[in-house]
Amino acid sequence: MGFAENLREELKFQDIQIKQLSAKTGISKNTIDKYLSEKRVQPGVENAVKIAQTLGVTVEYLVCGSEETSPHLSDECRSILRNYKKLNEFNKRTVSDLLESLASRQKNKD
């Protein structure tokens, strides 16, 4: 994913509207709309830093972030995700089935 997708996801995750981000960063709403548009306009360093600081994430995460580098995942979750990605498809299905079974069992006990 690129800057536009990561920014869009972060705004959604934090439940922040574009106009709110604009007010907090001092970057015009139209400029932020361009960053989110299909045209893939990339911000300059100064604006990327303002946006990242306002959202509490790194510029690197906004530019080339992934689930694995998400600031919302604990170190433990990142480790699990890295190991999961190393598995073949059969083992991934096995892990998914096991997690579903454990979650269901725990739900029934709660």
Image: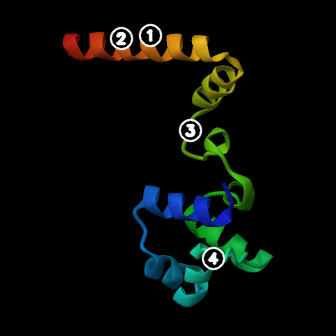
Q: CA distance from mark 2 to mark 3?
A: 23 Å
Mark 2, residue position = 101
Of pointers 4 and 3, the one earlier in the residue sequence: 4
Q: Quadrant of the C terminus?
A: top left
On the question of residue 38 being in view, the answer is: yes
Q: CA distance from mark 4 to mark 3?
A: 25 Å
Of pointers 2 and 3, the one earlier in the residue sequence: 3
Report the amino acid beneath label 3: Leu
Report the amino acid beneath label 4: Tyr
Residue under the image location 68 percent in, 60 percent down: 2
Of pointers 1 and 4, the one earlier in the residue sequence: 4
Mark 1, residue position = 98
Of pointers 4 and 2, the one earlier in the residue sequence: 4
- Whether 7 is drawn above or below 30: the answer is above
Report the amino acid beneath label 1: Leu
Q: CA distance from mark 1 to mark 4?
A: 40 Å
Q: Secondary structure at mark 2?
A: helix
- Relative to residue 54, is residue 65 drawn left or right? right
Mark 4, residue position = 35
Q: Quadrant of the N terminus?
A: bottom right
Q: Secondary structure at mark 4?
A: helix
Mark 3, residue position = 73
Q: Position of residue 18 (x, y in %)?
A: 47, 77
Q: Secondary structure at mark 1?
A: helix
